[in-house]
Image: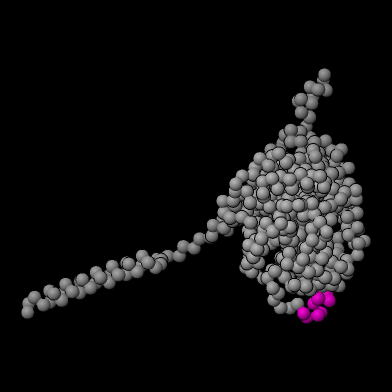
Amino acid sequence: LAIKPVITDLSVSLCSYSVFYLNSFICSQKSCRQRWNIRPSEMSINTLNPIRAIVDGMKLTPNPEKPMIALSIGDPTVFGNLPTDDKVLQAMKDAIDSQKYNGYAPSVGYQKSREVVANFYSCPEAPLEAEDVLLTSGCSQAIDLAITVLCNPGDNILVPCPGFSLYKTLAVSLGIQVKLYNLLPEKSWEIDLQHMESLIDDRTTCLIVNNPSNPCGSVYSKEHLQNILSVASKHCVPILADEIYGDMVFPGCTYQSTASLASDVPILACGGLAKRWLVPGWRLGWILIHDKNQIFGKEIRQGLVKLSQRILGACTIVQGAIESILNNTPQEFYHRTIRFLESNSEICFSELSTVPGLTPVMPSGAMYLMVGIEMEHFPEFQNDVQFTERLVTEQSVFCLPATAFEYPNYFRIVVTVPEEMMVEACTRIREFCQCHYRTCSRDSNELDQ
């Protein structure tokens, strides 16, 4: 009888140990957190917008005696001098008043709206049907879907340099390597085809071609596009054609879509209403699938549909207005916009061409002009970021340093500002350069000789 309590105590002890180890086992199988530890995802950590990273790090304190002139913003609506056409506005009003577009649309867009876009961009060389069109939340989402459907982590894409920073932002966040191919300022920003081709390897899954170009304002000739297509065809690399500035070309230049010249290269062409119709906030873009030889096949198309279902894409009201927008916008509206952009580009190029230490490159389209800085003549500044930063401080003119496009010692000017502001900005830039320009010792020796 005296032993029983001991056995009972031992049983209790064994039971306690059993519960302890059982709890330990359960904790090893399930979360038993003792404190909060919430971490951001790898994707969010890897997401970086180079423009924001550079601009946010700049010390931008304008001269209080001079009103600010921002030549850095790629939004044509900022100054109110480039309104969209009345027919475009009326199309939106009619779509709202109809009350037909207040609900959800299919993730790829309304069938009728897709037909309208297909008919607008179809041509004998590159025919389109509604099934070849996906409507997206702006051209940015179109680019996102195109990169995501073509690439896996560890793959690489070829991106222009200088080029639109979003390509890298999207790719790097997905674990995709970005390889930069050079553009040639002395050839109006044509692609260095030899350099581009040298970057292609077995993991290259996409070649991005931006024509007309942001930030360069270049427009590629038919011959140059054919040469680009030849490289893509030789190495069996599909093309993502960023054509958001399509048809925004100056008189004397001709715009041709990449797909209209392709014979075998499959192309995902991305575009939208934002720039040509001057409504970037309306967020309607599209992907046009050009696949004459069924190289993409069903898999890529199905992949795009699945990706589009992650969010319910483009604004339904704009989809309801798209037929009237595309079919009823008068040609004079397009021509008037182009005339203004060309005039401002010519003013800017003419004024800055005579400024010592600067080398502007005349654009052929889009809304931008790139200016080279001969840094050896501005020894106070280490780079284009410091140059443009001081330009704000002294002259209240903000131009985007081209380091944001991975192309140092240049800056980009947006030519959508009112003409009088463009003239004033160029005058201030001239004054700034005259103040800081220094003759190189080499130049002095040449003068002495």
Residue at the image point whose x is 85% and y is 48% from the top: 364
Q: Which x, y percent locates residue 300?
A: 65, 61
Q: Is residue 19 visible?
A: yes
Vertical position of residue 348 compared to residue 109: above or below: above
The part of the image, by quadrant, that contains residue 377 is top right
Residue 98 on the magenta span: yes
| Render colour scheme | one colour
**Is residue 65 among what the camera can see?**
no
Q: Residue at x 23, y 73 (%)?
A: 15
Identify the magenta region: 93-100
Q: Residue furthest right?
A: 332
The relative height of residue 115 versus residue 41 in the rendered view (above or below) is: below
- Which picture quadrant has residue 142? bottom right
Q: Residue furthest left?
A: 1
Where residue 332 sits in the image (x, y, percent)? 92, 61
Instruction: Tell me what residue is drawn at x 84 percent, y 66 percent.
Output: 326
Q: Looking at this view, is 408 or 392 the one in front?
A: 408
Residue at left 72%, top 36%?
A: 380
- Magenta-highlighted stretch: main secondary structure? helix
Name the quadrant containing residue 10: bottom left
> Would residue 47 be counted in the magenta stretch?
no
Q: For the view shown, which residue lies furthest in the front direction? A: 293
Q: Is residue 250 left or right of residue 28?
A: right
User: How many numbered callouts?
Assistant: 0
Percent across and percent down for residue 36 are: 45, 65
